[in-house]
Image (tube, helix red, strand yellow):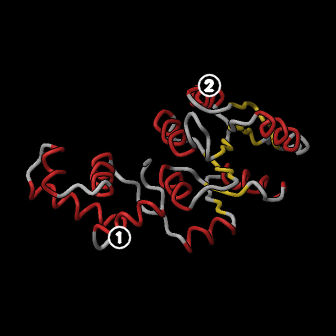
Amino acid sequence: MNTTVMLIDDHAIMRMGLKSLLDTYADIKVVADAEGGEETVRTALAKKPDVIVMDLMMPIMDGTESTRRILAEWPDAKILILTTYGTADAIGHTLEAGAKGAMMKNAELDELVAAIKKVARGERFIDAEISQMLSENPPIPELSPRQRQILESVTRGLSNEEIAKMLGIGLSVEKEHVRATFAKIGAANRSEAVAIALRKHLLKI
């Protein structure tokens, strides 16, 4: 029985090349491809492939958001992330969002096919390089919108009083938000929080 696959990558040449390679396997059938964005969600819902093989770093809608959107509409979707230079945090967040597996694009084709079949069976697949990356750099849990506001304000040097006024909340509530945000990223104080935010690229500043 064939395993049906959908390919998602913002580079057309990558999609075409991977399709040509996968077409050499009699039991793998590429039934759709998309470059990202809303097209990804629409095509995935229309085709319902056994496995969605998706790039992580895409400009319109990245792999993490695409995973969330697809699974919100189709909870049984099985997604395998294929990436070249994803960070531990980005990969970790995509796995937390519900992706079944992740592997680097420099993997051997037979390894990719094995991963596709494993994910199609509902099993997880994380390749050795990504496993080591996640082990050495445990991803920070994704911040809520409020926590991002707090961290951005701290990075800008705002005081607790200024942050509380900006958010329209009491000082005691603001301090609790700051404590929770720092705890989530593993920071003991403001200096550490700023350093982690910059090192981990947690904010677009």
Q: Residue furthest front?
A: 157
User: Which is more toward the observer, 102 or 37?
Assistant: 37
The location of residue 114, given as percent across then percent down, is 77, 56
Q: Residue at x 33, y 52 (%)?
A: 152
Secondary element under disc 2, as helix, strand or loop, is helix
Q: Image check: 139 left or right of 111?
A: left
The location of residue 22, given as percent across then percent down, is 84, 43
Q: Residues within 10 Å of mark 1 (few under 14, many from 20)?
A: some
Q: Residue at x 29, y 48 (%)?
A: 149
Q: Which amino acid is tagged 1?
A: Glu
The location of residue 25, given as percent across then percent down, is 88, 45
The location of residue 169, given as percent across then percent down, is 11, 47
* Picture quarter with the N terminus: top right
Find disc 1 in the rendering and name its residue: 192
Secondary element under disc 1, as helix, strand or loop, is helix
Up-down relation of residue 188 to residue 88 (above or below): below
How far apart are the alpha carbons under marks 1 and 2?
47 Å
Q: Which amino acid is tagged 2?
A: Ala
Find disc 2 in the rendering and name its residue: 46
User: Which is more toward the observer, 37 or 178?
Assistant: 178
Q: Residue at x 72, y 51 (%)?
A: 116
Q: Residue furthest right?
A: 24
User: Which is more toward the observer, 61 or 168?
Assistant: 168
Nearest to viewer (mark 1 / mark 2) = 1
Q: Earlier in the sequence, mark 1 or mark 2?
A: 2
Up-down relation of residue 147 to residue 50 (above or below): below
